[in-house]
Image (cartoon, rainbow, N blue to C red):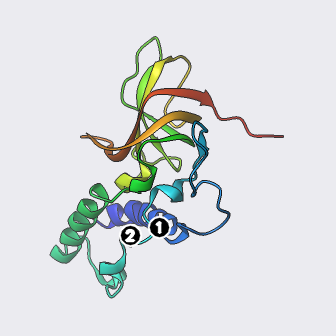
């Protein structure tokens, strides 16, 4: 259990940071785009401004919990339920959007990947517990993407919809983009 806490805590803190940053910084990615324009979104825009998943844990001393403590097990179960049911930003439902992130394949054939989860940080859903549902996007590409691998960084564009998708192994998503355009993420030099 202690090992799980060590893996879960960084993911929990990242999600907390995303929730705390929601609404901070420049207005790009948080306002409405002109009709027909694709809105470049930042991950924190997907989190409702009033959602605080840590409120119920503020008075707990995590360091005092032992691996086999029933309170620790109960808290982890509750935390996972809160994250899996994390609310989405309904103002973004139906938005033509572009989002950058990491690929967690849901299918992988010799021809490439067509269906995957898009996540905000490296290792999410694979090496660490899944982020909250409002930080996972279920993507179905318009065509199979050749040469795409787990944890590759991509830009995904398409119609963002609020929709739950549950993968037994990888987590629960709060959004989807179907018929998505998928491009490799290239940094400017």
Q: Are marks 2 and 1 in contact (CB under 8 Å)?
A: yes
Placement of the C terminus among the 4 image quadrants? top right
Q: Is residue 88 above or below residue 67?
A: above
Name the residue at 34% across, 79% down: 55
Using the image, tell me which numbered label, if any, was put on residue 51.
2
Placement of the N terminus among the 4 image quadrants? bottom left
Q: Is residue 67 above or below residue 91?
A: below
The picture places residue 140, in percent across and down from the top left corner, at 41, 28
Q: Nearer the viewer, residue 134 or 48?
A: 48
Answer few, some or many: residues within 10 Å of disc 2's Cα (few below 14, many 20 plus, some between 14 and 19). some
Q: Is residue 53 above or below residue 123?
A: below
Residue 3 seen by the camera: yes
Q: Secondary structure at mark 1?
A: helix
Residue 153 seen by the camera: no
Q: Secondary structure at mark 2?
A: loop
Disc 2 from disc 1: Cα separation: 7 Å
The picture places residue 112, in percent across and down from the top left corner, at 47, 17
Q: Nearer the viewer, residue 6 or 185?
A: 185
Answer few, some or many: residues within 10 Å of disc 1's Cα (few below 14, many 20 plus, some between 14 and 19). many
Nearer-N-terminus badge (2/1) = 1
Q: Quadrant of residue 28?
A: bottom right
Name the residue at 35% across, 70% down: 53
Spot the residue most to the bottom: 59
Q: Nearer the viewer, residue 145 or 168?
A: 145
Q: Viewed as shown, does residue 117 lie left or right of 156? A: left
The picture places residue 75, in percent across and down from the top left corner, at 23, 72
Spot the residue most to the top: 111
From the image, tell me which residue sits under label 1. Answer: 19
Spot the residue most to the left: 70
């Amino acid at each position: 259990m202690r090992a799980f806490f060590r893996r879960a805590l960084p993911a929990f803190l990242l999600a907390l940071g995303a929730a705390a940053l929601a609404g901070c910084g420049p207005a790009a990615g948080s306002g409405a785009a002109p009709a027909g324009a694709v809105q470049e979104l930042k991950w924190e825009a997907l989190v409702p401004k009033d959602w605080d998943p840590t409120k119920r844990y503020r008075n707990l001393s995590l360091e005092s919990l032992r691996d086999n403590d029933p309170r620790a097990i109960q808290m982890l179960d509750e935390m996972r339920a809160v994250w899996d049911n994390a609310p989405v930003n309904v103002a973004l439902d139906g938005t033509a959007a572009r989002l950058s992130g990491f690929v967690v394949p849901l299918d992988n054939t010799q021809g490439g990947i067509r269906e995957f989860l898009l996540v905000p940080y490296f290792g999410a859903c694979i090496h660490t517990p899944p982020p909250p549902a409002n930080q996972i996007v279920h993507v179905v590409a318009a065509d199979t993407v050749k040469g795409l691998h787990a944890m590759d960084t991509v830009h995904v564009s398409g119609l963002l919809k609020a929709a739950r998708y549950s993968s037994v192994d990888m987590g629960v998503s709060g959004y989807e983009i179907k018929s998505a355009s998928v491009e490799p993420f290239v940094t400017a030099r």
